[in-house]
Image (cartoon, helix red, strand yellow):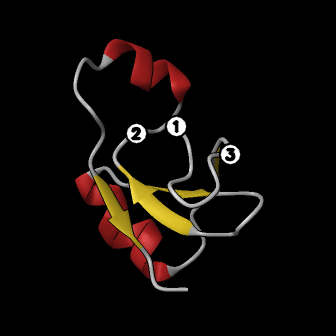
Amino acid sequence: MKCERCGRNLRRLPRITYLQKEVFSKVGYYPWECPLCRKLRLIRQRSLADRRSEPTAPSTVDLPV
């Protein structure tokens, strides 16, 4: 997965906030971040292994910075 702003690979972040732990975990969204521009996103994939097995593009939700 690449960042739409700068094109770098995104990295998976641990869930920290209440929403991330309780709400987004129930619907399958995981926090991801671009290490360069620090844009946060919620993506419906847990890891690269999930992406390889899934034929369609992941669902994403942009988080306000």
Using residue 44 as the reference point, say whether residue 15 is left or right of it: right
Query: First in sequence: mark 2 or mark 1?
Result: 1
Closer to the camera: disc 1 or disc 3? Answer: 3
Closer to the camera: disc 3 or disc 2? Answer: 3
Label 3, label 2: how many angstroms apart (C-alpha)?
Answer: 17 Å
Q: Residue furthest right?
A: 36
Label 1 crowd bin: few (<14), some (14–19), many (20+), radius 10 Å: some
Q: Nearer the viewer, residue 1 or 11?
A: 1
Q: Look at mark 3 in the image and give the residue it sits on.
A: 8
Amino acid at dot 2? Gln
Q: Nearer the viewer, residue 13 or 5?
A: 5
State if disc 1 and disc 2 touch (CB < 8 Å): yes
Query: First in sequence: mark 3 or mark 2?
Result: 3
Q: Secondary structure at mark 3?
A: loop
Label 3 crowd bin: few (<14), some (14–19), many (20+), radius 10 Å: some
The residue drawn where x is 64% and y is 56% is 6
Q: Look at mark 2 in the image and give the residue it sits on.
A: 45
Rendered view: 24 above or below 63: above
Q: Secondary structure at mark 1?
A: loop
The residue drawn where x is 47% and y is 38% is 46
Label 1, label 3: how many angstroms apart (C-alpha)?
Answer: 8 Å
Amino acid at dot 3? Arg
Name the image quarter holding the C terminus.
Answer: bottom right
The residue drawn where x is 35% and y is 13% is 53
Q: Secondary structure at mark 2?
A: loop
- Residue 44 in the image: state x and y as whole percent: 34, 46
Query: First in sequence: mark 1 or mark 3?
Result: 1
Q: Residue furthest top?
A: 53
Q: Which mark is residue 1?
A: 1
- Residue 59 in the image: state x and y as whole percent: 26, 48
